[in-house]
């Protein structure tokens, strides 16, 4: 049984040294975004990465910041107001249902969220629905190893099982960095053969 991040510990998500563990620009180096990109931060928490995603989107693009916990939505909204991020929309999301139109997202970030998903296959299918044909999904997950930060390894899915699940759900691994002691990074795009592969 997974559990959601407890926002009583919100300050842990706001530590600036988190950017040394993972910086979203690592994905940007692997991706070419269109001129007015639509980005989505799925499980935004306190919105720690929003200033960076807002910069990626620029004045012509936009960022959706989504979370299932109302406390997270409130905190991310406050951050967006405080920082004056005019191209970020914060919204409540449901476990496996994103409040986004079909074929609308160019890049989605799933940072330190996957191990909290109750039905990961469903969210991966939902992400496929909202993603544009050439969109990318950036996944960051804790390593399944003893660390001095983050949840215990027993709460983290096996990386190979996770990769297999992405493949089953029509996601093709484009790039990965599994060299870190704290977290692993994966970049996926939509497998063009997915419609042929997946059952109706
Ligand atoms: N991504 C942020 C970061 O790294 O700073 C927050 C990480 S926090 C550990 C995980 C967040 O994901 C929590 O705020 C939780 O409510 C949210 N979350 C969990 N399952 C979710 C889902 N199915 N859809 C959207 N958000 C979800």
Image (cartoon, rainbow, N blue to C red):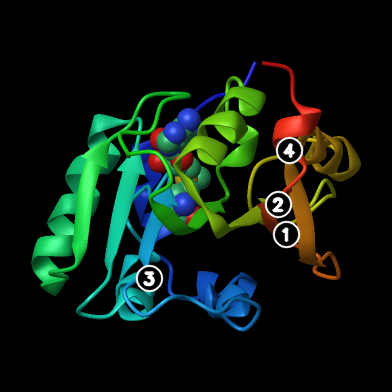
Task: Give the alpha-carbon distance from disc 2 to disc 4, as whole Å.
Answer: 27 Å
- Pointer 3 and pointer 1: residues touching (CB < 8 Å)? no
| 2 vs 1, front mark | 1
Give the spatial CA distance, label 2 vs label 3. 21 Å
Give neighbour class at mark 4: few <14, some 14-19, many 20+ (Cα, 10 Å). some
- Residue that appears at 13% across and 55% down: 78
**SS of the residue under disc 4:** helix
- In the rendering, which numbered label is found on residue 121? none
Quadrant housing residue 137: bottom right
Q: Earlier in the sequence, mark 2 or mark 1?
A: 2
Q: Nearer the viewer, mark 3 or mark 4?
A: 4
**Taking the image as drawn, is residue 114 in sight?**
yes
The CA span between labels 4 and 1 is 19 Å
Q: Are marks 4 and 1 in contact (CB under 8 Å)?
A: no
In terms of depth relative to the viewer, which is nearer, 126 or 162?
Answer: 126
Q: Mark 2 packing: few (<14 Cα in 10 Å), some, or many (20+)?
A: many
Identify whether 111 is placed above or below 171.
Answer: below
Q: Quadrant of the N terminus?
A: top right
Give the labeled residue for mark 2.
142
Q: Whole-percent x and y of residue 125?
A: 59, 30
Question: In this rendering, would 54 be left or right of 43?
Answer: left
Left or right of 200, for residue 163: right
Q: Which residue is mark 3?
A: 53
Mark nearer the N terminus (3 vs 1): 3
Location of residue 181 (image quadrant): bottom right
Q: In this figure, which residue is indicated by the disc labeled 1?
A: 186
Residue on which disc 4 sits: 194
Q: Mark 3 falls on what kind of element?
A: helix
Q: How far apart are the alpha carbons under marks 2 and 1?
A: 12 Å
Q: Helix, strand, or loop for circle 1?
A: strand
């Amino acid at each position: 049984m997974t559990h959601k991040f407890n926002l009583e510990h919100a300050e842990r998500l706001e530590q600036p040294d988190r950017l040394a563990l993972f910086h979203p620009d690592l994905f940007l180096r692997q991706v070419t975004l269109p001129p007015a990109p639509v980005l989505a931060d799925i499980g935004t928490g306190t919105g720690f990465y929003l200033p960076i995603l807002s910069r990626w989107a620029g004045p012509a693009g936009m960022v959706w910041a989504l979370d299932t916990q109302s406390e997270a939505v409130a905190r991310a909204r406050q951050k967006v107001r405080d920082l004056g991020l005019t191209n970020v929309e914060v919204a409540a999301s449901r476990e496996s249902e994103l409040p986004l139109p079909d074929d609308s997202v160019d890049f989605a970030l799933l940072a330190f969220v996957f191990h909290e998903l109750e039905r990961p296959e469903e969210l991966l299918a939902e992400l496929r629905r909202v993603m544009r044909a050439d969109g990318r999904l950036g996944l960051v997950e804790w390593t399944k190893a003893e660390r001095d930060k983050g949840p215990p390894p027993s709460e983290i899915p096996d990386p190979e099982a996770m990769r297999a699940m992405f493949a089953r759900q029509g996601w093709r691994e484009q790039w990965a960095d599994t060299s870190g002691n704290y977290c692993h990074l994966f970049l996926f795009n939509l497998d063009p053969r997915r419609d042929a592969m997946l059952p109706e």
